[in-house]
Amino acid sequence: MFSLSALAGDEWDWKLPGYVPAPQIPPDNAMSAAKVELGRRLFYDTRLSANGTVACSSCHQQARAFADAAALSVGSTGERTYRNAPGLANSAWHATYNWANPSIVSLERQMEVPLFGDDPVEMGINDRNRDGILQRLESEPIYLPLFAKAFPDQEKPLSMASVIKAISAFERSLVSANSPYDQYLQGQHRLNEAQRRGMDLFFGERAECHHCHGSFNFNDQVVHARSRIVDMQFHNTGLYDLDGHGTYPYPNRGLYELTGMAKDMGAFRAPGLRNVALTAPYFHDGSAATLREVLQFYSQGGRNLDSGPHKGDGRLNPYKSGLIARIDLSEQDIDDLIEFLETLTDESFVRDPRHADPWKKDLGMKVAP
């Protein structure tokens, strides 16, 4: 039986290692055990989609560090997303969300995209069906008391605004900081020779991975509770050049889709690499199937496609970042880098029952006070 009494206390304990600062929490959406539990149930609930066929978890699966095995995810109406679903580990520390949108700077704002977006349709909520979806949630016995406990100061706790805040709180709780690499940093684990060679390459000036993936979150867009200046970097890595003038395939042209400025063509956010061995396929469009393929791409300083609709030599893209240059990694180098990247896999994170689907266990059960 699910018990609300187990969700006591208002203080959220992040349980972070010393090198990971506390995240920045919106003042209007404080963390609490009740809110996180509510968000977890909503995250896994297909009743939140217009036709009841998909949930947030459909495209963000715990076993894959909350990423999707498909290059492009399928929404509730069968439409595919334009971009690959990123993993959600440590998303509490992201400065921006989605692949290339500097205006989306909170999980709450990001949640509006899959819920309400219509190009493509993901969850499919709109003004015509919103009330009916809320009525579905209200009919579930667990929800009314859980919304009331999560939002005790609201006259009507069950609302779409509360749904968004609760799911955002759950996503903030998805902390991954117990990988073998984390244990190594804390003196609790030893890396083998290949992993150490890979680490030296990763953080060294030859492979230069650390320039875009050097933070505790292994990305270069980080915000936390003590942040004063927030850097929002986006990079063209030379994936495409359709016409010799730097063009990327529509509608995946990065920041250019928002700004219309040529210099922003192909510029995307560098994703965090925690649990990266679990989150294939890779890149914003899921066009690389394996980590080896990704590392070979960076070894060559971009990608040359000699056939197909995206034919072109991205290595020569005029808007490619100066950080992306040919480095000619050997097969041994690539093997070693993969060995290191696999130390970022946090098995406790992908198996943590606090992040798992609660409906498999107790859907429809009574709620204890």
Image (spheres, rainbow, N blue to C red):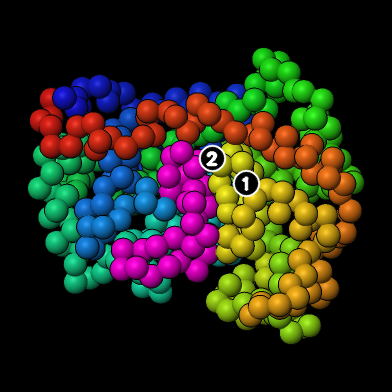
Left or right: 102 in relation to 69: right
Which residue position holds label 1?
272
Q: Position of residue 222 (x, y in %)?
A: 63, 46
Circles 2 and 1: CB distance less than 8 Å?
yes
Q: Work out whether residue 99 or residue 21 is closer to the camera in this orientation and state it.
A: 99
170 to the left or right of 41:
right
Q: Is residue 199 above or below residue 263?
A: above
Local crowd size for mark 1, using a 10 Å CA cut-off: few (<14), some (14–19), many (≥20): many
Disc 2 residue type? Asn
Q: Pick out the residue farthest to the top.
A: 188
Give the residue at x 83% y 73%. 316
- Which residue range is magenta in the image? 60-88
Image point (49%, 48%), residue name: 67
Residue 34 has which mark?
none
| Residue appearing at x 44%, y 36% in the figure | 173
Under circle 1, the secondary element is loop
Image quarter for residue 307? bottom right
Q: What secondary structure is the stretch in magenta mostly built from?
A: loop
Q: Quadrant of the N terminus?
A: top left
Q: Nearer the viewer, residue 254 or 71?
A: 71
**Toward the viewer: 221 or 322?**
322
For image coordinates 41% across by 74% down, the residue present is 119
Q: Amino acid at mark 1?
A: Gly
Q: Is residue 285 visible?
A: yes
Which image quadrant for residue 198?
top right
Neighbourhood count class around disc 2 (C-alpha, 10 Å): few under 14, some 14–19, many 20 upward: some
Dot 2 corresponds to which residue? Answer: 90
